Image: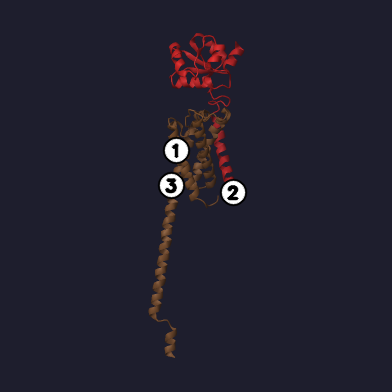
Chain colours: A brown, B red
Amino acid sequence: MAQEEMSKTPNSESVREQSAQLSTSNLQLSGDASTSNIKNRTSYILRRIVDLIVAGVFIYAGAIKALDPVQFANDIDNYKIFPWPISVALAFYLPWLEIFCGFALVVRLLYRGALSILTTLILTFTLVTIAAKVRGLDITCGCFGHASQNWSFPSHLATNLAILAALVVLWVSNRSPKPL
Amino acid sequence: MRSSLIRQVLILAALALIPGLGEAVYFRQRISWQSSIPPSELVTVDQARTWAGNVIWVDARPDEEFARDHVPGALSLNEDRWNELLPQFLAVWSPGKKVVVYCSSLSCNASREVARRLRKEAQLSNVFVLEGGWEAWLKKR
């Protein structure tokens, strides 16, 4: 009877083994979790850095143009796409759109809307720049006000493509962002 | 998902409209909605006539149009033959003289471009664009 009782009760050795196994697997799990936490954190930090760089570029570009809309209207007019009144309207409007979208990226509010607008803007600027080159127009890039006045076509295009690449990175890394 | 995206785009577009409109009101004196030339660089036929002997008229129209008729005493300076015609113009120009550039009409760009190049490339000041161009001159002749 006593022997039967003994065989039913787990001996202390096997209990110790089991608990050791459990703690090892717990350690592995917590190790995996912390690795994935570090990964997530790193990717979040990288994403935020790209966010801030893109936002900074657009806020700077918008501010420079908002300070001198007359010059920007002339820069738009140089592309010979719109009639003068439309160039003026765009010169007043586009810089603020860039600034608001830039801030939206910084505070992550209306985030996807801002990404959509900025991607559309940069694609349009790039296409218009290429079209101007093809048409043989000697255009002044109004992108960054006076700072970009003497930019060559390749540097103008390279800047646009770099910004576009950064925006694509943000799109891909924020595929399931929080809604508004 | 899509409607939320559209809503975000619309909110941002509307937000940007507010300071844009404010700026349009603030800059209303410094930019014209009708013409790309700032009001300070435009001159009317009557104003230009009051400058009488102190003005050089520059015809920015193509050679054929200049040959057909032009403002008395005007020099031809168009972008097609810029390098050839600019020295001829500079030979006549002297400091203190006002330069009035004109092209065909209100809607042409040639006078604006020639005036811009005279300011930028020849470093001249006192360069004006004739409001209404050759058409305005003909009406006042």
Residue B55 image label: none
Which of the two discs, 3 and 2, sits closer to the camera? 2
Q: Find numbered disc 3 in the image and state the secondary structure of the residue it sits on.
A: helix
Same chain under badges 3 and 1? The reply is yes
Task: Confirm or deny contact between disc 1 and disc 2 (CB under 8 A).
Answer: no
- Label 2 neighbour load within 10 Å: few <14, some 14-19, many 20+: few
Q: CA distance from mark 1 to mark 2?
A: 30 Å
Q: Give A17 or A109, whichever is nearer the viewer.
A: A17
Q: Which amino acid does the dot numbered 1 rest on?
A: Thr
Q: Find numbered disc 2 in the image and state the secondary structure of the residue it sits on.
A: helix
User: Which chain is disc 3 placed on?
Assistant: A
Task: Confirm or deny contact between disc 3 and disc 2 (CB under 8 A).
Answer: no
**Circle 1 is placed at which residue position?**
A159
**Circle 3 is placed at which residue position?**
A49
Residue A66 pos. (x, y %): 50, 34
Residue B37 pos. (x, y %): 53, 23
Q: How many marks?
A: 3
Q: Which amino acid does the dot numbered 3 rest on?
A: Ile
Residue B81 pos. (x, y %): 48, 18
- Toward the right, the furthest residue is B139
In the image: residue A27, left or right of residue B138? left
Taking the spot 57% from the left edge, 47% from the top edge, the residue there is B5
Quadrant of the image containing the C terminus of chain B = top right
Q: Which amino acid does the dot numbered 2 rest on?
A: Arg
**Circle 2 is placed at which residue position?**
B2
Q: CA distance from mark 3 to mark 1?
A: 18 Å
- Going from N to C along the chain, the mark reached first, 3 or 1, is 3
- Label 3 neighbour load within 10 Å: few <14, some 14-19, many 20+: few
Asked if residue B70 shows in the view, the reply is: no
Reply above or below: B107 against A72. above
